Image (cartoon, rainbow, N blue to C red):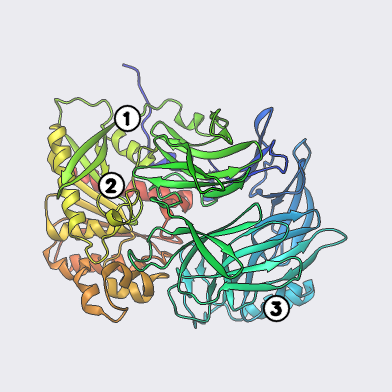
Amino acid sequence: MKQYRRFEPEDAARIRLPGKMMFSPDGKTLAFAVETPEKENNRISFSTWIHDEHGSRQLTYSRDALPLAWNSNEELIIQRNTEDTLPGTTALSLINIGGGEAKPFCTLPFVLSDLKKVSDDAWIACGFIHKNDPDLYLCTEQERRQKLKEKEAEKDYTVLDELPSHQDGAGMVNGRRNALFLVSFRNGLKVRRITSADISVNEYAADEEKILFTAADMHTSAHKECALLGTYSFKNGKIKMIVDQPVYRLDTPLIRNGKSYVLMTNMKEYGAKQTPVLYEVSGRKLKPVYEPAYALTNLANADLRTKYNTRNGVTDGMICTLASVEDHTELWAIDEDMKTKALYAGAGNISSIAAGKQSLALIHSDWETPPEIFLMNIDGTGLRRITDLSEAWLKGKQLNPLRRIDYVSHGKQLHGWTVLPADYDPEKKYPGILDIHGGPRVNFGEAFSFEKQMFADHGYFAFFTNIRGSDGRGDEFADIRGRYGTEDFDDLMAFTDAVLKEFPALDEHRLCVMGLSYGGYMTSRIITKTDRFCCASVHGPVINWISMSMTSDIGPWFAPDQTGASSVFDFEQMWQTSPLRYADQVKTPALFLHGTEDYRCPVWEGMQMMQALTVRDIETRMVLFKGGSHNMHYTGAPGIKIRRLHELLDWFDRHTGK
């Protein structure tokens, strides 16, 4: 028998992933970033690559060379901060795709988050300012150094006086704003801020006449999913607010052939995550023009991804967008008559797209292929893969097969999957792991999962499903607000029964359960209702909706919305759906994994349940990952990813007797 190498936790720090794609102005060359883990330095670095008629190749080899924008068809602007870069600024370099070293270009006097070219002499930059010193970018280097010195004296304390004061993945953001700047590089660097310190820009789109942007109003305690909508005119240099009160959820501003669009919902029927409708913006009027049946974004639960993803683009009169359909992500084109065409609708996950003049690029993953870049013609034909970033990573490994399982729960036709253990023998007995996705309004699908392959390689059935509350089947199916831990619990138990029936080799006495975020909530809730699982792993959960509502970066609006509470002061309703309320009923050993900088479900969430089990002498263990955010399973440093996976395997192995 041929020997294959198993997937091990260390492999999480070996795979390279693509992201941040952008076409050159003529559409002939695609630039993209490649994320590379550096285990020896315990960090993630980025390099710049391109694809043209000669194939795909790496342009930069030094650390952290991130592509930002095309300066011309031959030159890329890249971000390349060094030890000499002054804090609070962004160093830009130019690199010619024909060859040669990157050359210093300029240093922007703020931390840059995005850069777009409007014309040869007009650029839009999005970058960070602080409400107490919004014009710091105008200071000389000497003045800036003096202010940095003064700031150093304040390092031992932080002032919080607004919501949100902290943000997962970004830390303490009290007073920080995302501002729009006009930038000119001709005849020396010229920078002018055009948005006020009263708002923080979320997203924007632009053409040669205007900028269309959404922004949060920082002087209100209103629902932070709600946004303002404004335009900036290049002709008169003024901003006009179209929606000036935060009463709607606004996403994805787009400009197509001079017409402006935005996704919008009032959230009244299905809450904060209600599927938005596409509106055309004309003057101060908004007219609904397209009501999608599915969310126009990627909602796939994936353990291999980068943070640099784009879900829409415009080309050749088409709005190109991702759509989450049942258990996969599709690439759609919406024409000027608002008719849609699925350009790609295969199984798997599309995490990002880029639109060029002749081609579309997509980062796609299916069950046998980790995320790679594919190109297609703008009519959806000619799909071809252009990167092989995972080829060396997969060498010597054998992928474990996936099996679909259909089942019924409360009259609903549902389905899930199981990954068979390596070298599966139906005459043997194997332990299993039920994995529950986050959200809850995301979905599982037939996309590559490193974790599930690793579990299968270590002798487990790894099984997972989309229950009620998952996205991809419309708002009614996805809406379980106020009913967490009820019908979703029933669906998970029905699925577990279906897997046991389909595979007698799965040992019902050696079942484990795990989940992150909402999955962590459900794992905690499951062990308060049943002891059919021999152990549980809980990652970044909500344990107490009351404490979460008062401490999370999204708590003041998310907790009431999801629990059916009338406000953050409706403690009784939030307590009824909190796993902590039922902690005295737990008999199952539970492992808690939490990042110390998880501001979505703060660390004391897991800590409360862990301590509740400890005082009852239920076996438990909590591992805190320093610097880890809510999404540390894919954004974390290599050391965090590796240790987390070892903790999972060790916990499951010990409690299943492996």
Please report contact status of discs 3 and 1: CB closer than 8 Å, yes or no. Answer: no
Q: Which residue is mark 1?
A: 400
| Image location of residue 278, percent across then percent down | 49, 57
* As drawn, 311 above or below 603: above
| Residue under the image location 15 percent in, 33 percent down | 502
| Image location of residue 629, percent across then percent down | 43, 60
Q: Label 2 is placed on what type of residue? A: Asn
Q: Nearer the viewer, residue 357 or 643?
A: 357
Identify the image quadrant of residue 315. top right
Please report contact status of discs 3 and 2: CB closer than 8 Å, yes or no. Answer: no
Q: Which residue is mark 2?
A: 466
Q: CA distance from mark 2 to mark 1?
A: 21 Å
Which circle, 3 or 1, is nearer the viewer? 1
Q: Label 1 is placed on what type of residue? A: Asn
Identify the image quadrant of residue 485. bottom left
Q: Residues within 10 Å of mark 2 (few under 14, many from 20)?
A: many
Mark 3, secondary structure of its residue = helix
Image disc number at residue 147: 3
* Residue 290 in view here: yes
* As drawn, 188 above or below 536: below
Q: Earlier in the sequence, mark 3 or mark 2?
A: 3
Q: Nearer the viewer, residue 260 or 116?
A: 260
Number of numbered tags placed on the structure image: 3
Q: Earlier in the sequence, mark 3 or mark 1?
A: 3
Q: Quadrant of the C terminus?
A: top left
Which circle, 2 or 1, is nearer the viewer? 2
| Image location of residue 613, percent across then percent down | 18, 65
Toward the right, the furthest residue is 187
